[in-house]
Image (cartoon, rainbow, N blue to C red):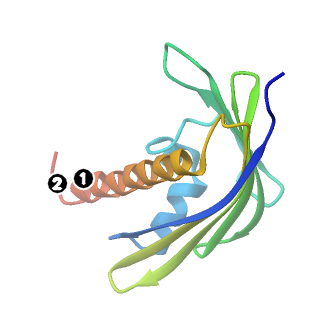
Amino acid sequence: MNERFVKHATFAVERTYAASPERVYQAWADPVAKAKWFSKPEIFDFRVGGREYSSGGPSEGPVFTFDASYQEIVPEQRIVYTYTLDSGSTRVSVSNTTVELIKLEGGTKLIFTEQGAFFDGHDTPEIREHGTNLMLDALGKAFEEENGHEHGEK
């Protein structure tokens, strides 16, 4: 029998984007915009009590399943959701996530805080924080591409 254990952890990642809080919020609230920097959702019901669901992964496997429920939404200021992450048929974590949007001169400060329970060594807080950094970098690249198109660049 494999040893069972839970590792609890909290981490926060901050980014500043040259985009208004309205644009940053829309990047989370609109399924087409979100699919540019996050996995394309199979279910996307962005409201308190709503659900976001997606699954996928590399062709060599495994399939990862993200299943979130929105707990609180304050437009252009805060998004709170809980989610499970599965690898194949194995639950690897359960998390509570808060995304805060703070208006700055010429942009938005985003604070992403995750409080997670990571199961049996299938995932770790360090790996998740690294993945979150990559995800928020991808969001920043999506804004850069939008800004380029707004200015007639290719």
Q: Secondary structure at mark 1?
A: helix
In this picture, is 130 found above or below 16? above
Name the side, left or right, on which 25 lies relative to 6.
Answer: left
Q: Secondary structure at mark 2?
A: loop
Question: The N terminus appears in which quarter of the rendering?
Answer: top right
Question: The C terminus appears in which quarter of the rendering?
Answer: top left
The picture quadrant where one finds residue 93 is top right
Residue at image coords 75%, 58%: 47
Residue at image coords 27%, 59%: 147
Q: Nearer the viewer, residue 95 or 78?
A: 95
The picture quadrant where one finds residue 64 is top right
Q: Which residue is mark 1?
A: 149
Residue at image coords 53%, 50%: 126
Q: Position of residue 18 (x, y in %)?
A: 32, 70
Residue at image coords 36%, 57%: 140
Q: Nearer the viewer, residue 84 or 31?
A: 84
The disc at residue 152 is 2
Label 1 amino acid?
His
The picture quadrant where one finds residue 152 is bottom left
Q: Position of residue 39 (x, y in %)?
A: 54, 37
Marks 1 and 2 in Cβ contact (< 8 Å): yes
> Around disc 2, counting alpha carbons within 10 Å, would you say few (fewer than 14), some (14 to 19), or many (20 or more)?
few
Label 2 amino acid?
Gly
Name the side, left or right, on which 152 lies relative to 74.
Answer: left
Instruction: Give the CA distance from mark 1 to mark 2.
Output: 5 Å
Q: Nearer the viewer, residue 65 or 20?
A: 65
Q: Spot the residue most to the bottom.
A: 105
Q: Position of residue 121 (x, y in %)?
A: 66, 37
How many circles with numbers are drawn on the protein? 2
The disc at residue 49 is none
